[in-house]
Amino acid sequence: MNGVTDMNIQNDGDSSNEMHDGSGPSVKGSNTVNNAQNSHTISNLSAGLKSVTLSEQEQSQINMNAIQQELQNEGSAQQQSRISQFFQNQPTEGYTLFSHRSAPNGFKVAIILSELGLPFNTIFLDFNKGEQRAPEFVSINPNARVPALIDHANDNASIWESGAIILYLLNKHLKENGDCPLWSNNIVEQAQINSWLFFQTSGHAPMIGQALHFRYFHSCPVPSAVERYTDEVRRVYGVLEMALAERREALIMELDVENAASYSAGTTPLSQSRYFDYPVWLVGDRATVADLSFVPWNNVVDRIGINLKVEFPEVYKWTKYMMRRPSVIRALRGD
């Protein structure tokens, strides 16, 4: 909210290093070594190795080190193989979404895939194991972050950055079906939707992400940074609140005709209209990606001390309606 983050250096078992640095087992007696040095058939190293005597404790420790090293190597191979094996045996249809369990931007893409009814599978990367740095993944996303998407039906085309992925899906759906319910056929409406989409990706998500970072993850407290980013998040929500409030007023004035005059005169508050809790959207009369792209981040904003229900009631109602959509529920569950 999209969290995005070594190995202990073990003894490599090189006996010659142990002997050279004095950290290995002791060499008993000098006569054997001297005799070996005088022989033309035995190397100095072989002679030295022949004269090494290990105690039971030393041998046990060496065996344990070897077992631990082998287990570590096997574990590392398994970590790498999960990503490598996928890229070696990719599906021939549908989509694969690379995400993370705590990455709102990944869930944002999942919501759009689910809303469009597209078949997809999600691979949740393990950042602690460094899976986002696997060469195969970096080959499709040079930024080594999530989300990233592969369209298997389109020659395994890969797209990264949530906004770019969403636009790809919208354009493809429009081209293949002649219509896209989350977007528009009208170029002006497309531009309006894109404006909110870019506002979300450039102003909304990054500010919440920074506020979360300085509140919970920074190495030392920086109160000014927490205040600065939290205030900026509130400013962003103020923009949304005003836009949604204007949309609600226009809706009420259009539908509640018999009371429109009293609303205009200010004698009757808009909150008394039966349409006051009717859903409104940022562009047009339906939910589009302009709205849905905000959902995952709205779902975590309480963690930086912002109460949408109290501070931004229109944003709260808007978010609540979207959170009830079956596709959103499925996507946020990670289905």
Image: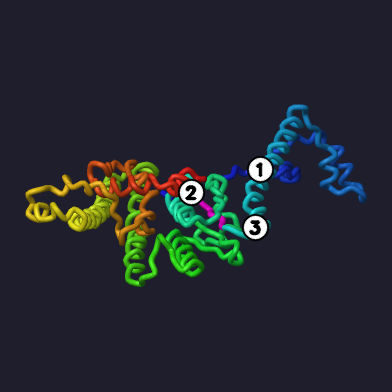
Q: Quadrant of residue 216?
A: top left
x then y, percent, for residue 108: 43, 53
| Kind of residue at disc 2 | Thr
In the displayed structure, does residue 124 sit left or right of residue 229?
A: right
Residue at 36% across / 49% down in the picture?
A: 322
For this rendering, which residue is in front, 23 or 239? 239
Q: Which residue, as the protein is rendered here, is positioned at the far bottom?
A: 187
Q: Chief secondary structure of the magenta span?
A: strand
CB within 8 Å, label 1 to label 2: no
**Camera-side residue of 8 and 124:** 124
Q: Secondary structure at mark 1?
A: helix
Q: Which residue is the site of mark 1?
A: 75
SS at mark 2 in the image: loop
Nearer the observer, 274 or 221: 274
From this viewpoint, is residue 261 visible? yes
Chosen colour scheme: rainbow
Mark 2 neighbour class, 10 Å CA radius: few under 14, some 14 to 19, many 20 or more: few
Q: Which residue is mark 3?
A: 90
- Say which residue label 2 marks: 5
| Three-letter amino acid code of the residue under disc 3 | Gln
